[in-house]
Image (cartoon, rainbow, N blue to C red):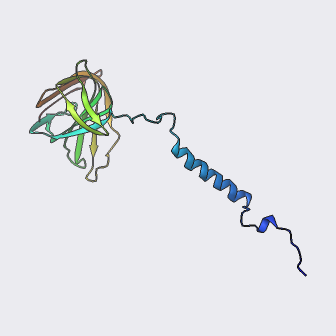
Amino acid sequence: MAVGTTPNPSKSLFCVRPGIRHAGLLLAGALVSLLIPGPGLRAGEQQPTDFGRVQRATRSCERNLAAASPGPCSELRFEQNQQGLLNIRFVGIGSGEIATNLVTFVGVVKQGGAGLSCREGRCRLEGPLSTEITSVSELGFDQRGLPTSLPSAWPADGTCTVEKHDVRCEARALSGERWTATAEL
């Protein structure tokens, strides 16, 4: 004679303990959220493409660090984090523990200039152009490429002009420091 049994839900293959069920629901929710566009990017919209960098070796280059006498530089970097805002970095050899130093002129591209034309982080320089300098900063890096200190930065007035093969920046801080930098590309 067969004995009838009623199914025990705690031993069923399809019953899951509450803690595991909760974790499964969270995982499923996370996976679904990856498929739904977030508030910053809707379906069919492109990611912002107005930022990137252009790096150029220089034929000749000279820049000063505040009150120091002018020193050589070997590379020029144009960096755009937002359309119309352009950082022009003069990269040079440091001294002592500083292997490399940067003098950066941050400016707003004046009317008529495009700055950098970027697509997916790849940029090309659209010149000639001119920027109104808003600040200047200096920063040194050691042999490993790590900063040797916090950057020194000053609000400043001045201009940078970029022609076909020539770049010239001049700025003056409100506290009196002056910077000049020139490069031939």
Q: Which residue is at the far right? A: 1
Q: Nearer the viewer, residue 54 or 65?
A: 54
**Residue located at (86% from left, 72% from top):** 5
Q: Which residue is at the far bottom? A: 1
Q: Vertically, is 126 above or below 72?
A: above
**Residue located at (71% from left, 57% from top):** 19
**Could you say where residue 113 lies in the image, as x and y percent from the top left?**
22, 22
Left or right of residue 48: residue 131 = left
Q: Which residue is at the far left? A: 59
Q: Nearer the viewer, residue 171 or 15?
A: 15
Q: Nearer the viewer, residue 107 or 48?
A: 48
**Could you say where residue 157 lies in the image, as x and y percent from the top left?**
26, 20
**Residue located at (89% from left, 77% from top):** 3
The C terminus - image quarter = top left
Left or right of residue 11: residue 115 = left
**Could you say where residue 151 lies in the image, as x and y percent from the top left?**
33, 37
Q: Is residue 66 visible?
A: yes
Quarter of image, res 56: top left
Left or right of residue 58: residue 40 = right
Quarter of image, res 10: bottom right
Left or right of residue 59: residue 30 = right
